[in-house]
Image (cartoon, rainbow, N blue to C red):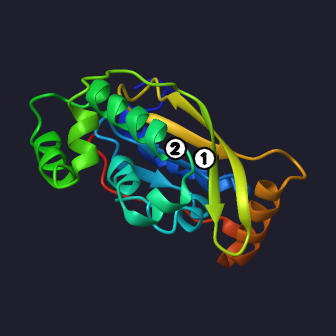
Amino acid sequence: MPRGVIHDSDTPDRIARTLSQWTHTPAYVSDPHRDIIASNPLATIFGEGGLAAGSNQVSALFNERMRRSLLEWEPMARSAVATLRRDAHPQSPRLRELLRQLSVHDDFRRIWERHDVSGPEDATFRFVFEGVGEIAIDAQNFAVRSMPGYQLTVLSAQPGGLGASLFARLADTLPGGAATTAMTGVER
């Protein structure tokens, strides 16, 4: 291999390393089935574990806490399910497993039956965070070009606002200044 060329198998490690440097904004990478394969500590703590490596982004939306806390739950759930339908490998055992798990929820079955295949890539959503109040969070989704079907999601808040204050406060609670990253096994 020529000097300076990086093997594709190094990509997940480089992504995890990059996320570990983002200490004041939650960020995570998900695979085509929306399984989170890398997450920075701020995403893990902000999502109360639902945005941690090893979690599934779509499944996390269908828990009771998210239904109560996410004010735009219906449009966010529709968008997440549409993204799953668009990006997941249709014949994969993982998709079948997710569909089996999620089908216990009437709302999931209703949304899946819409057959939407695309939702907004970026969104602002309002979240009621216990002990803080209502905050507005921007979610930006980026394709990971070196890993087709994978998506980088970065959450941010308006500078000086309640969301930015919350992110700063959460970052201060993390050991080592939020500079650690979790990563699960990635298909290479």
Q: Is residue 51 visible?
A: no
Q: Pointer 1: residues within 10 angstroms few (<14), some, or many (20+)?
A: few
* Residue 7 position by quadrant: top left
Residue 155 at x, y percent in the picture = 64, 45
The label on residue 18 is 1
* Residue 88 on image: x %, y %: 25, 31
Q: Amino acid at mark 2?
A: Ile
Q: Position of residue 51 (x, y in %)?
A: 47, 57
Q: Nearer the viewer, residue 110 or 6?
A: 110
Q: Is residue 33 left or right of residue 131?
A: left
Asked whether 13 or 119 is in front, the reply is: 119
- 110 left or right of 121 in image: left
From what the image shows, is residue 164 above or below residue 32? Answer: below
Q: Which residue does the numbered mark 2 point to in the structure image?
A: 15
- Find out whether the residues at labels 1 and 2 contact each other: C-beta distance under 8 Å: yes
Q: Secondary structure at mark 1?
A: helix
Q: Quadrant of residue 85?
A: top left
